[in-house]
Image (cartoon, rainbow, N blue to C red):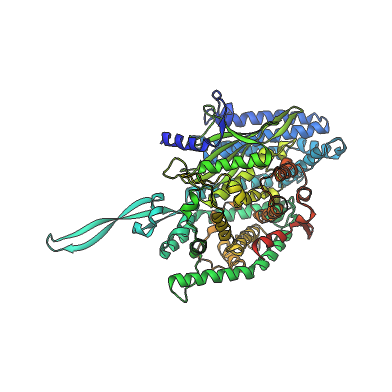
Amino acid sequence: MLSRAAAIRRGAAAAFSTVSEKPETGLYGFEVLRTAKGFRRFVDDAIQRSDELVARVARLPSSPEIVRTMDEISNTVCTVIDSAELCRNTHPDREFVEEADKASMRIYEHLQYLNTNTTLYNAILKAEAESVLLTEEARRAATILRIDFEKGGIHLPEDKLERVNQLNLEIAQLGRKFSENVMNKPGFVDVYPASKVPRNMQHHFKSVYRSNFGSFEKQSNQMITAKQKGLRIVTDSGNLSSALRWISDEEVRKQVYFVGNSEPRENIGVLNGLIDARDELAKTMGCKSYADFAIRPNMAASADVVMSFLGDLSNIVRHKADEEFKVIKDFKRRICNEKSADLEPWDEDYFIGMMKSSVHDLDASVVAKYFPLSQCLKGLNVLVESLFGATFHQIPMRDGESWHPDVIKLSLRHPDEGDLGFMYLDLYSRKGKFPGCAHFAVQGGRRLSDSNYQLPIVALVCNFSRSSGITARLSHGDVETLFHEFGHALHSLLSRTEYQHFSGTRVALDVAETPSNLFEWYAWDYRVLKTFALDETTGDAIPEKLVKALNASRNMFPATELQRQIFYSIMDLTLFGEQASKPMDTISTVADLRRKHTSWKCAEGTHWHTRFTHLINYGAGYYSYLYARCFATTIWQEICQEDPLSRSAGGAIRDKFLRYGGSKDPSSLLKDFAGDAIIRNSGGGIIPDIGSLRKEIGL
């Protein structure tokens, strides 16, 4: 297995040049993490260092020094939090995962102590009052730090502050439990006979057997018993998606849909607890709902502004979505030769996929041959070199730095500026690993001195399936996902902020997804794809006709997809909005919202939202994906579309947006980047202009 993993790693690494090896170290390059128990020392050292820095702040130095010292405290704590989070989600060694989990909770408790430390709060009030002494970025840092303190309740009476601390800890624990249940309790369906699953999918699933009693044999006077082979489909997100897309047997799809959207049942109670705790927290902080509490620091400013925006968008898209629904229903009736057949929830992916493939003559296996993973990684190099004049280079890792043989490490290097940052790639699925795709920070960037900058370190984590060959082949959907997460990684790698508190993706939530949505556009553009999407056998570039077919397929049901995202966003805001009753019946609430805001039926009794992990990390913030889609579509159309790989487009992306991280007001950042028309004022908050989005989907 190790030799095969090494071969796969070599295939991925072939996209990059290499530099010399370095000596032994610990996980992610931190000496203290040579063993799992090193996480204990990692936390101890961080607590000791932050206590020393608190003592420095207590001596009330100058305002610039206060801000810089506070940022160093943030850097010290965040490095532990971020490293523990990456380890918890990816490390194959259970001891490392458990120690990282304990470290995460310990450092979180210390963070609560820091967030309620009056010495620090009074110091930042002093710095903010003396703003004339600070640079523009330092003034923004002082204000944001003060807001962060007040979000922790430091300005409240002691009894309320203590309750806020308890609630924050409870919320963190419930969030972790929710995510662990999603990962560890996905549910499964046993399908008999195995022939009900397409042959080319069967190798993804475990074989199971049951007794199959045959006929009575007269000669031997015996009943013949045979074993019937079946397949166990574990209904995690990847298998669920594949089964609903490719299995033609409707009864199997229905079984898989019901199980996959009814697990984990434990999360019904976990989510109820989370809703109650967040609601009490918000009300203790003087807000009418958790949604208002969470959105108040963002551009949108209030839940009412967001809900009004989403309601308007839902009304705008409804007619076109209903038309698309009728087209899909008519298609099912023709295929099944049933004039009265209804569309069911488990039909959506299957019949939409079938229509797209048949209308545009798309064969997934033909598409995938142009996207071997090694070529897709070369595509990332094409992007950074064309846009920014930089290149990725593979760095052989020191002993102990990596967490799995598949992982590779890259440096992003500019010929004039040197190394810009470092990125780990952990791209293949494996048991016990975080099931989705994500960008993790390990270390934020910050200015150490006039000549020294702490370079950012990130990890790009995906769950691509291994193929039978040396390197995996990606579907085009996988390529889009890779480019999405790469957009996040670039945000971290290319920001150049004075303070790590603003590094990369540490921005207002409703602008955070903009770079990732922008780089999705690159995965659909023929001028980009032809530079790296090569047939692994012939070396021929992907045909323009095929890319046009992919785009035409993508554009077949745009209102249906937009409607789904609107529904997700409204659901998220409703669950964490004003609470009419406790506990909320989330199953019926979500079902009612689905019926109101989509054209599709709800499968009674299912509760897919109990595996929707965005409710944890993006609670009352899922709308930010729609904000970002609007922003990214405008940026693409106005700045990138004419020549997406030009240095002028890259210069604008880097110098007017990515460089600043969270160090500029996001509305000013967007307007400076793409013009005043990209945003609009509404009800005391800011919403995106939807003109570009309407143009994109033909509304």
The answer to whether 479 is drawn above or below residue 28 in the figure is below
The answer to whether 612 is drawn above or below residue 113 in the figure is below
Among all residues in the image, which is located at the extreme right? 132
The answer to whether 572 is drawn above or below residue 412 in the figure is below
Q: Looking at the rendering, in which quadrant would you find the N terminus? A: top left
Looking at this view, is 665 or 221 the one in front? 665
Q: Is residue 112 visible?
A: no
Q: Tell me where residue 133 appears, x and y as whole percent.
A: 86, 35
Looking at this view, is 94 or 90 the one in front? 90
Residue 194 location, quadrant: bottom left
Among all residues in the image, which is located at the extreme top? 23
Residue 25 location, quadrant: top right
The answer to whether 52 is drawn above or below residue 570 in the figure is above
Q: Report the label total.
A: 0
Among all residues in the image, which is located at the extreme bottom? 339
Residue drawn where x is 79% and y is 33% of the image:
66
Among all residues in the image, which is located at the extreme left? 219
Looking at this view, is 390 or 396 the one in front? 390
Q: Is residue 127 left or right of residue 406?
A: right
Q: Is residue 35 left or right of residue 54?
A: left
Q: Tell me where residue 456 appears, x and y as whole percent.
A: 66, 35
Q: Looking at the rendering, in which quadrant would you find the C terminus? A: bottom right
Q: Is residue 478 visible?
A: yes
Residue drawn where x is 58% and y is 68% of the image:
324
Q: Tell me where residue 299 appears, x and y as whole percent.
A: 75, 52
